[in-house]
Amino acid sequence: MRRLFAPGTGVSAVNGDKSGVLYLCATPIGNLEDITLRVLRVLREVDLVAAEDTRRTRRLLSHYNIHKPIISYHQHNRRRQGRHLLERLARGDGVALVSDAGTPGISDPGEELVREALEKGISVVPLPGPSALLAALVVSGLPAGRFLFAGFIPGKGKERNRRLCGLAAETGTIILYEAPHRLVRTLHDLAEILGDRRACAARELTKLHEEVRRDTLNRLREHFATEPPRGEFVLLIEGVSKDEKLDGQGEWALLTPREHVDELVREGLTTNEAIKKVSRLRNLSRRELYKQIHGDLKN
């Protein structure tokens, strides 16, 4: 029998013949001191550590003199390794899941493992800690009372435009993850679709070269067009105010562009007339909105 944390208690408990426990362990996003005592204790007690980046996790464990078997679990091997992990859990093993950095299950394959474990009746216990999106939010200077985390936006195609247009009516602060080579284009597209709103670009959080830049979307784009961005970014964009007037059409502020078009069609406009009006009122690309709406109609 092994001594592991009982779910939700923070104290050790005997885990006999029952199925094991999947622990979601938040690990540092940069500074190695940003880890909880509870996570360190669980990492010492589990039977196995499943890591998105085994090299980074080995460095972390070595720093704290923890020696445990480690296997890789990432986007490209998640199905095969997921089956193995579920088998280990079913046998009663305790498994700690860690991501590349931060809280596992956020924009990584851990979400899939959690869902499958729950479907099989396996206990899943979160061990909270570092999170890049929350660290960026509280330092951004933008409203934190309501926010939408949209993860990574598709790099191209109709789905990218649909996702960006869907953010236009969001009233809370919008949070995105973005790679450095796509940052300038994403800032351009956001400004074109959402308007030139207040924004924040944060990178290398908690690390030596931490940078938090607050400005408008267009000025951020201009800056990073001349200063090539490095490192993974968290982008935060101010939401639309509930009281904001969009060219005298404040009643549309809480509708998505697609819903806006549908509403105008119900009022008697043709689809193309509605697209033209929505693109003007909301400062959207008419061509992209046309492709989105007519693409939906064909499907």
Image (cartoon, rainbow, N blue to C red):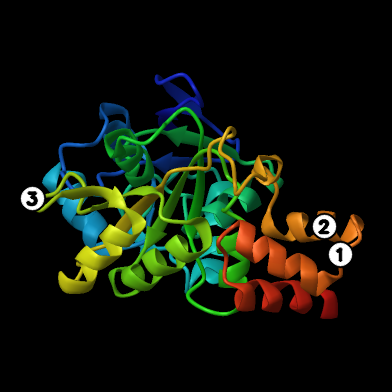
Q: Is residue 145 left or right of residue 64?
A: right
Report whether 115 appears left or right of 97.
Answer: right
Q: CA distance from mark 2 to mark 3?
A: 52 Å
Q: Which label belongs to residue 208?
A: 3
Residue, disc 2:
264
Element at label 1? loop
Compare marks 2 and 3 and give the one earlier in the sequence: 3
Residue to which mark 1 is pinned: 269
Dot 3, crowdedness within 10 Å: few (<14), some or many (≥20)? Answer: few
Comes first in the chain, label 2 or label 1: 2
Q: CA distance from mark 2 to mark 1?
A: 6 Å
Label 2: element kind: helix
Q: Is residue 299 visible?
A: no
Mark 3 secondary-structure assignment: loop
Q: Position of residue 192 (x, y in %)?
A: 47, 65
Mark 3 residue type: Leu
